[in-house]
Structures are given as structure tokens and as C-alpha cells.
Image (cartoon, rainbow, N blue to C red):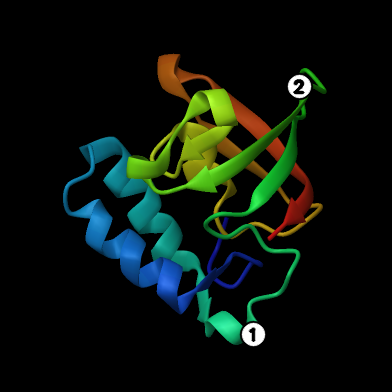
Amino acid sequence: MKKNDGLVISQTDRDKIATLLQGAPLNIAELLGDELGRATIVGDDVLPKEVVSMNSQIRFQDVETEKETTVILVYPSEANLDQNKISLFTPVGSALIGLKIGQTIAWPFPGGKTRQLKVISVEK
């Protein structure tokens, strides 16, 4: 993805993520840092409803398998897989932040595989 290609993050999310990245694993810090650098940062009150932000419920599709999954994107301390709450620091979480409904992103996953994820719906 390139700067201003539709990746949008709220100022509040950007500030908290930037702080958390200081203690994040290097691979996550680099990927999320790159995403923050490419994103358009907007005020919380003007963040479009169709954009994935922290605490959003997201339904997304793995384009290769066509499998759909619904998760809630949370900060690492709030992650709970039994409640479908995934950390921003997971490969899926870091891939989804800032995307809009209908957008697809190629994202590296453990094992060297790149997967295409498509956002189907977002609820705040």
C-alpha cells in the first residue's frame, strides 16, 4: 500500500499505537510503523464509519480460501480469543487497521506466506 491509498487512522489510535510500538516485537513494530507512516491521520470525530479502527468488529475474508472471520480489534492487553478479540500486534490485526470496507491487503504471515485479506464489514 502507498501513502494516501485509503489507509486512514484516527489521531487517538495513532498516538496510542505509536506508544505501544516502543515495546512491541521488532517485526510487528516495523510493519505497523510503516503502516502509520503511510496512513492519513484524521480526527476521531471525522473517521469514516467504514474504516477499521481499534475496538471495531470486523468481518474479513481470506481471499485465497474464501473463509470469512469476524473479530474485534483490540490493544494487546485486551486480547481474548474466546471472545474473538484479537490484538493489534497479531498479523491479522496489524493488517486490518485503517482499511475500509471492500479494501484488500497483501500481508506477510508467519512461515513466510503472504495472504490477501479483504474487509467485508466494520461495526463500531
Residue at image point 69% right, 45% down: 58
- Mark 2, secondary structure of its residue: loop
Report the front residue among 117 and 75. 75
Quadrant location of the C terminus?
Answer: bottom right
| Residue drawn at x 60%, y 85% as measured from the top left | 45
Farthest front residue in view: 83
Residue 69 position by quadrant: top right
Q: Which mark is residue 64?
A: 2
Residue type marked 2? Glu
Residue 46 - label? 1
Q: Earlier in the sequence, mark 2 or mark 1?
A: 1
Left or right of 92, for residue 23: left
Between disc 2 and disc 1, the foreground one is: 1
Splitting the image into 4 quarters, where does residue 5 fall? bottom right
Q: Amino acid at mark 1?
A: Val
83 displayed left or right of 32: right
Q: Is residue 69 above or below residue 111?
A: below
